[in-house]
Structure formats: structure tokens, C-alpha cells
Image: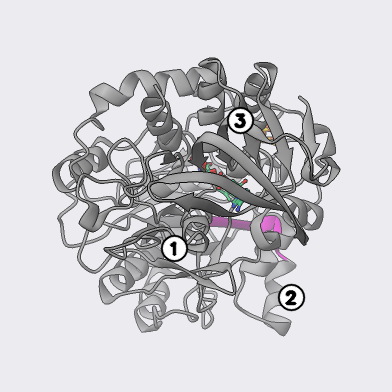
């Protein structure tokens, strides 16, 4: 694949295209591919570095610096939530954990009922899920779960909770466990090894180190896009196109529109940003778990997700994260000797995560993307409704870990203690505050902020993904979701973008 760095392009180059795409994640790269297949002259712009499979080293510090937004140190405005997002060729798909789920039908029905998204039925989306699955090699059963995942399954079985195996988007996976650092053998079928090279072969030009600063628009049309080289804001390139596709991801897309000062009469832009706020429970086993080896996510449970969205409790999906040393060290809100004592146990640690389904209740309306000196921040607040689900999740995860034979379990929390029995866990978790900056909350699933919908009063784009106020600007990424979805988003983004681009 031929990838250019914008810094090597002359400021006087001809930068006229039929279609300019901002962002090379699952949404941007697929929409770029679709446009190239329709014979359009396409440019795909990516603020990340021009790094490909051969450049990936199995080293966390290097990978986070090179492939993640803010070197994996992005947080919510108040610092309470760690937000992991890709800043890479291929976007989040280059560093994600390969879990591939279709959008839950319950979520689609809710979107139809409350947001007027009539075409987003499972029946109409099915061909596009199948197309995306075939493109990125989604199948089940390629890999036997590692011990980290196995212990989740064992614990859930013992407490009578249903669980299943996760389908993954891989071809020839070597079971290394380094998906989050960029797959070094190209087995993960990210956009980097699928849509992007295919689009490139059809003539799409790919520019890295290219930061889209703002759309230049007049009346009802975007006329051009102002772009700078990452780190060199004084050099401005002007890209022209008939159609502009904004696919800079949730946070990135609303931020670009906010910087462009586009019309926003109902102040919907950047609002309804969802994150599946995620709690963590750590467990120490007497046996070696070595959660840094092997495919990161292979077991899940939807047992604690209510099957009625309007029900009282938020509910959560259970999975495990990979546990590499830096990721663990920075996820622990404890310090000094306590931190050291826990890190010493790295090979024996199992961790379970609970991803809360947000967006379906008056007390779960998401956060808001705002700009400070042009830089985006997500302002996302917890509510008592969410805190209730956080507490329940810590109890359920700890109970499953103890049932699987954990020697000690520990809610990941500023005041979190290591406890050895269910009784002690119950007492401890019920005494903990679930407030921001006390409880550790993370997210790798940012969605919304440019919500689609039939009514402009509560959406940013129409049901076709076109921005309400500019006729040649469309959104094609996870920022379109009007709620969280209750499962890992990559395949949902690809199914949706496939349908909207057809
Ligand atoms: C560690 C991790 C693990 C995950 N695991 C899974 C998983 O197992 N399964 C799953 O389904 N999902 C997973 N996800 C989430 C999934 O990867 C994302 O939801 C998905 O990549 C979002 O796709 P997108 O196209 O909306 O945007 P992104 O993938 O975020 O792509 C947007 C791209 O736009 C670029 N960009 C932003 N602003 C600009 C700008 N101004 N100019 C130019 N470029 C810009 C960014 O650098 C980025 O590369 C994970 C995410 C992370 C971080
Ligand atoms: S487990 Fe290893 S080989 Fe398999 S997709 Fe992930 S990084 Fe690649």
C-alpha cells in the first residue's frame, strides 16, 4: 500500500478530488473504499503516522505513543474516565481487540422507535453485516480461549450466568495477544490490511500526518477542507472535493464540525456522546494466568443486560481485557507500596470488565464534546442510575472471580481492597463510593456526538448520515450512533457505513 506523509507533499500540489475522507478508521476506510469502487477520485486523510504492519513492535510505550490518541492518556474533562481511541492508519481497528458483534436487535428497534431510523432494521442491515464480516474475516472458533478468558467462563458457569465465545476478525492468528499494540503479523483484519489497501489499489490516495483543521463552507456547501501537518500548524493545505466525508471517530468528528463553526441551531452537536462506561475487577489466582498472552477477548456474557431497554437497571456486558504491564500499571488508582505489591503479581492476575449500556434512560443521556483552544474534551458525568449499575457490576465480577477460584479479588477503585470471600466483597463494595475519580472507569468504545435522526431538533445528521445544514457533508463513523449500543462497536459501524454508502 502506498501511503504518503502530508509533510512530504508540496503546498502547491493539486489537491482536488471527488471525495475527501477525514479519518481512516473502520468507518472512513470503508466509505473511502466504496467511493473508489464507484470510480471516484478519493483522498483519505489520517492524523496518525504512516505506520503499517512491519513497523509494529511488541512494546507498549512505543505503541501507545505511535498509535493512540494522546499516547493512550486521553481522559474525560474531569479526568475521571480513561478513554482509549486509535490515532493510527486504520483508526481503532489497528489497535482493537478483534471482538466482532453485530448490533443488538434491541438497539436497532429502539433507534427505529425513538429516532425515526426506519431503515436500520436487522433485515435491512443483514447484507451489510455479512459483507463487512466477509471483508474482515469474522468467524468463530479459530482460537482456544487463554486462561484469562477461560476463568471468566468458569466463574460465570459456577454462578449460573450464561456466556458465549466471541467471533473475531482474524485470518491466520498466531495467538500472540498483542492486538492492542498493532498486530505484528497482519493477522488481524483491521482496515489497515483490508479496506485501505483495497481502496489504494483502486486509486485512492492516502495521506498520513494530516490533521483536518476545519471545513471552509459557504451557504449550504462545503467548499474546501483546511489541513495541517501534525505538529506544524503553520503549514495549511487546502483540499477541495465535491463531497466531504467526516469519519474522524466519535470525539474527532464533532470536534472537527465544532472547529468549523457549522450551523447548530438546536445545539445537538457533540451531545449524546456515549462510552459504555466500564468498571474493572481484578483477581489474583494461585495459578499463573498470564493474561498478556493469547487472543485478548474470546469469552463474553450478556447475562446481566436486561432484555427490555426501558427497564430500571442499566445492565452491562462482561468481557476481559488483555493485561500488559503498562496497561495494568496505569489502570490502578493506587500508589506506592500497594501498587508495587499488586504489580508483583502480574502473571497471576485475572481481570474482568463490565461495559455499561448507556443511552437508553433519562439518567443516561451521554456526555458532550467541547473544545478548549481547539482541543476536544468529553464532558461525561455519572448519575445515581449509572452508579447503581457500577456497584452491581463490581459485585457480579468479584463473585464470578471467587467462584472460579480466585485467592483474592479487588474492585479497581481508589479505596479498593483485596478481599478473600463473598461476604467480605459484599460488605466492601457496598461501602465504596461510586463517584467520579473514586471508582476507576475506562472506555474503549466512544460513540455518538453527531447523532443521526429524523428530527433536526435532536440530531446532527439525517437518517442518511448527511449533516443537516450542509448538503455535501456526510458523516460515516461511530459518531452517528444516537445511543450506545450495548456491545463492541466496530462491526456495527461497518454495517451502518456499508448500508449508507450503498
Ligand atoms: C484498545 C481498544 C480496543 C477495542 N476493542 C474493540 C473490539 O474488540 N471490538 C470492537 O468492535 N471495537 C473495539 N474497539 C472500538 C473500535 O475500535 C472503535 O469503535 C472503532 O475503531 C471506531 O471506528 P470509527 O471509524 O468510528 O473511528 P476511529 O477508528 O476512531 O477512526 C477515526 C480516525 O480518524 C482520525 N482522526 C481524528 N481526527 C482527525 C482529524 N482532525 N484529521 C485527520 N484524522 C483524524 C483518528 O486518528 C482515527 O484514526 C476498541 C477500541 C480500542 C481503543
Ligand atoms: S492475537 Fe496476535 S496474531 Fe492474533 S490478531 Fe492479535 S496480535 Fe495478531
How far apart are the alpha carbons under marks 3 and 1? Answer: 54 Å
Q: Is residue 302 visible?
A: yes
Q: Position of residue 244 (x, y in %)?
A: 51, 39
Q: Which mark is residue 17?
A: 3
Q: Position of residue 414 (x, y in %)?
A: 54, 81
Q: Which mark is residue 420?
A: none
How far apart are the alpha carbons under marks 2 and 3? Answer: 54 Å
Q: Position of residue 289 (x, y in %)?
A: 65, 50
Q: Which residues are magenta?
A: 345-351
Between residue 13 and residue 368, name the one nearer to us: 13
Q: Are marks 2 and 3 in contact (CB under 8 Å)?
A: no
369 over 144 or under it: above or below: below
Q: Position of residue 342 (x, y in %)?
A: 67, 71
* Mark 3 nearby-residue class (10 Å; few <14, some 14–19, many ≥20): some
The residue that disc 2 covers is 340
Q: Secondary structure at mark 3?
A: strand
19 over 335 or under it: above or below: above
Q: Are marks 2 and 1 in contact (CB under 8 Å)?
A: no
Which tag, 2 or 3, sits closer to the chain's start?
3
User: Could you tell me how many numbered marks the image carries?
Assistant: 3
Q: Secondary structure at mark 1?
A: helix
The colour mode here is one colour
Between residue 263 and residue 193, name the one nearer to us: 263
* Mark 1 nearby-residue class (10 Å; few <14, some 14–19, many ≥20): many
The residue that disc 1 covers is 398
Q: Secondary structure at mark 2?
A: helix
Amino acid at each position: 500500500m502506498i501511503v504518503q506523509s502530508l509533510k512530504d507533499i508540496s503546498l502547491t500540489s493539486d489537491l482536488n478530488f471527488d471525495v475527501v475522507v477525514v479519518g481512516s478508521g473502520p468507518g472512513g476506510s470503508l466509505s473511502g473504499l466504496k467511493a473508489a469502487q464507484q470510480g471516484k477520485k478519493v483522498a483519505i486523510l489520517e492524523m496518525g503516522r504512516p505506520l503499517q504492519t512491519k513497523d509494529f513492535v511488541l512494546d507498549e510505550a512505543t505503541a501507545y505513543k505511535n498509535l493512540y490518541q494522546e499516547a493512550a492518556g486521553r481522559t474525560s474533562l474531569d479526568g475521571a474516565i480513561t478513554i482509549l481511541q486509535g490515532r493510527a492508519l486504520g483508526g481503532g481497528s489497528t489497535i482493537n481487540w478483534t471482538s466482532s458483534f453485530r448490533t443488538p436487535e434491541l438497539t436497532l428497534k429502539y433507534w427505529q422507535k425513538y429516532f425515526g431510523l426506519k431503515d436500520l432494521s436487522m433485515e435491512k442491515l443483514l447484507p451489510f453485516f455479512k459483507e463487512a464480516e466477509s471483508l474482515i474475516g469474522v468467524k468463530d472458533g479459530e482460537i482456544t480461549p487463554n486462561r484469562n478468558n477461560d476463568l471468566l467462563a468458569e466463574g460465570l458457569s459456577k454462578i449460573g450466568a450464561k456466556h458465549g465465545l466471541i467471533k473475531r476478525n482474524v485470518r491466520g492468528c498466531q495467538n500472540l495477544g498483542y492486538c492492542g499494540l498493532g498486530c505484528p503479523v497482519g493477522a488481524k483484519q483491521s482496515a489497515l490490511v483490508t479496506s485501505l489497501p483495497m481502496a489504494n489499489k483502486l486509486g485512492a490516495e492516502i495521506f498520513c500526518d494530516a490533521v483536518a483543521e476545519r471545513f471552509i463552507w459557504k451557504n449550504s456547501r462545503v467548499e474546501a477542507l483546511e489541513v495541517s501537518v501534525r505538529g506544524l500548524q503553520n503549514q495549511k493545505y487546502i483540499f477541495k472535493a465535491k463531497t466531504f466525508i467526516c469519519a474522524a471517530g466519535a470525539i474527532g468528528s464533532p470536534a472537527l464540525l465544532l472547529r468549523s463553526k457549522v450551523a447548530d441551531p438546536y445545539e445537538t452537536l457533540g451531545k449524546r456522546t456515549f462510552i459504555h462506561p466500564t468498571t474493572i475487577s481484578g483477581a489474583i489466582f494461585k495459578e499463573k494466568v498470564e493474561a498478556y498472552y493469547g487472543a485478548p477477548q474470546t469469552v463474553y456474557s450478556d447475562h446481566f443486560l436486561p432484555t427490555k431497554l426501558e427497564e430500571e437497571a442499566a445492565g452491562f456486558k462482561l468481557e476481559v481485557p488483555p493485561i500488559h504491564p503498562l496497561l495494568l500499571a496505569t489502570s490502578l488508582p493506587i500508589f506506592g507500596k500497594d501498587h508495587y505489591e499488586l504489580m508483583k503479581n502480574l502473571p497471576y492476575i485475572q481481570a474482568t470488565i463490565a461495559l455499561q449500556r448507556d443511552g437508553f434512560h433519562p439518567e443516561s443521556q451521554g456526555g458532550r464534546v467541547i473544545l478548549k483552544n481547539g482541543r476536544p474534551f468529553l464532558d461525561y458525568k455519572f448519575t445515581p442510575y449509572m452508579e447503581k449499575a457500577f456497584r452491581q457490576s463490581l459485585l457480579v465480577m468479584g463473585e464470578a472471580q471467587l467462584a472460579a477460584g480466585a485467592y483474592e479479588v479487588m474492585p479497581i477503585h481508589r479505596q479498593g481492597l483485596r478481599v478473600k470471600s463473598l461476604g467480605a466483597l459484599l460488605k466492601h463494595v457496598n461501602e465504596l463510593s461510586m463517584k467520579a475519580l473514586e471508582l476507576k472507569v475506562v472506555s474503549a468504545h466512544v460513540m455518538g456526538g453527531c447523532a443521526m435522526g429524523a428530527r433536526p431538533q435532536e440530531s446532527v445528521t439525517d437518517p442518511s448520515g448527511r449533516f443537516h445544514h450542509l448538503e455535501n457533508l456526510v458523516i460515516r463513523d461511530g459518531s452517528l450512533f444516537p445511543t450506545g449500543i450495548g456491545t463492541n462497536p466496530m462491526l456495527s459501524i461497518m454495517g451502518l457505513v456499508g448500508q449508507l454508502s450503498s
